[in-house]
Amino acid sequence: MTIQTLRQAYQSGALTPRALVAELKAKMALHVNNPIWIYTLNDAELEPHLKRLEGAKIEELPLYGIPFAIKDNIDLAGIPTTAACPDFAYVPERSAYVVERLIEAGAIPMGKTNLDQFATGLVGTRSPYGICQNSINPEYISGGSSAGSAVSVALELVTFSLGTDTAGSGRVPAAFNNLIGVKPTKGVFSTSGVVPACRSLDCVSLFTKTCADAQTLFAIMASFDSEDVYARMIPTQTKTLEKPLRIGIPRKSDLQFFGDAEAQTLFEAAVARFIKVGAVVEEIDFTPFLKAANLLYSGPWVAERYVATKALLQKSPESFLEVTRTIIAQGEHKSASDYFEAEYALKAYRREAEQCLKWVDFMLTPTTGTIYTIDEVENNPIELNTNLGYYTNFMNLLDLSALALPAGERGNGLPFGITIFADAFEDTKLLSMGEIYMKELPCQK
């Protein structure tokens, strides 16, 4: 189900896109008790995509017949977008810019996936369409907000999926479902046709099973969208990997595993794997990153979530889940002075972070310090969600690029993940490092 293996099957004649779609739809039916999808395309809706491919040359379309899923806060023309709020739903006339690029390259959209309502959460439990279960153990959370997007790839219902990432939504579900999670530099992937969470921070993200697939997709999706006022072009000169590799990790006093001893052991093993491939590891003062993370929900940026949903929230507050409404409603009372005070603090943290990053090629952290069961999160939704953002909430505020990677399994089979991150526009460098690292995982040999 990788891009490479499917293309080989198509080129040899062993498989056709139409046959693959039929197989996948049958496979989806086996997972109906897990609310992965909010909407799946029917035969009539899939037909134009399949018909187009029948007259196309495989070598001219880099994603010929590659099935993918779309988080349901990203538009697909003619298909409802809900953001996991039925009263918010609308049917867009045009697909999101990144979706258009993928379909033009030959990819087949299979459906719209479940998410934490209005992309507000890292848990995957905050949806009126049901709680999306972990792909490995259904008692555990899938991670959010891009819950269904991650699970659909993990269960091989699609080859890749689109998520979004404002505070960790493209990395936490990757960690919990043993996937690659790409959180690009802000603006490199267009957010035209994406329901805003915090528009100035939002990123479209990617879930794949291999770094090779992520690299292929990145090259297609990193297309400048002149209609997106937040879009940014990748500089012609970007940093590449150099030897010796220098990696920064948080000081032991800054690491937090929330009592999860197995996670700590797996992180230490991941550090050892980087040393094995020639990296020099240095402990870094993680304080500026943690201080920036605290600004995301305690600061004024929650007002952006309020702006994005203000009309519905004022007209019909009952349309929101209680936990979502509680979080977003805080934004109504943030003032301009709150914003500027936080912005000044953030600039200081950014400068401190720059000083840390200039001494290393990239930073390495856990993606999350631990994982929780669905019951645990339901009983303590705010605090546990906050814990999951410990290593993720600062990323877009500080304008960084990030790549989430698998990093082994706990004794109960649940995966653990790490994240490598660097400054803006160092995405391809991270993907190259991810490819090297993945070869050192025991399960990859």
Image: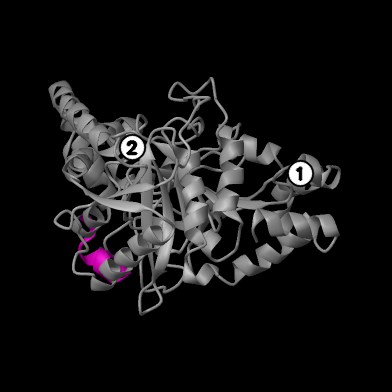
Q: Which quadrant of the view contains residue 187?
A: top left
Q: Is residue 51 magenta?
A: no
- Do callouts 1 and 2 mark residues in contact (Cβ within 8 Å)? no
Q: Is residue 417 left or right of residue 188?
A: left
Q: Position of residue 72 (x, y in %)?
A: 49, 46
Which of the two residues, 282 or 144, is positioned nearer the viewer here? 282
Magenta span dominant secondary structure: helix
- Tell me where residue 365 sits by quadrant: bottom left
Q: Which residue is mark 1?
A: 48
Q: Residue shown at 35%/74% (left/top)?
A: 410
Q: Quadrant of the C terminus?
A: bottom right
Residue 379 highlighted magenta (yes or no): yes
**First to last magenta residue range:** 370-382
Q: Earlier in the sequence, mark 1 or mark 2?
A: 1
Q: Is residue 344 left or right of residue 149?
A: left
Residue 386, which numbered label? none
Q: Helix, strand or loop at disc 1? A: helix
- Image coords of residue 84 (percent x, y): 42, 49
| Residue 390 visible in the displayed image | no
Label 2: element kind: loop
Q: Dot 2 corresponds to which residue? A: 396
Viewer-nearest of discs 1 and 2: 2
Render colour scheme: one colour
In the rendered structure, which amino acid carries the disc numbered 2? Asn
Q: Residue at (20%, 57%) from the top-left corner?
A: 255
Q: Position of residue 234 (x, y in %)?
A: 50, 27
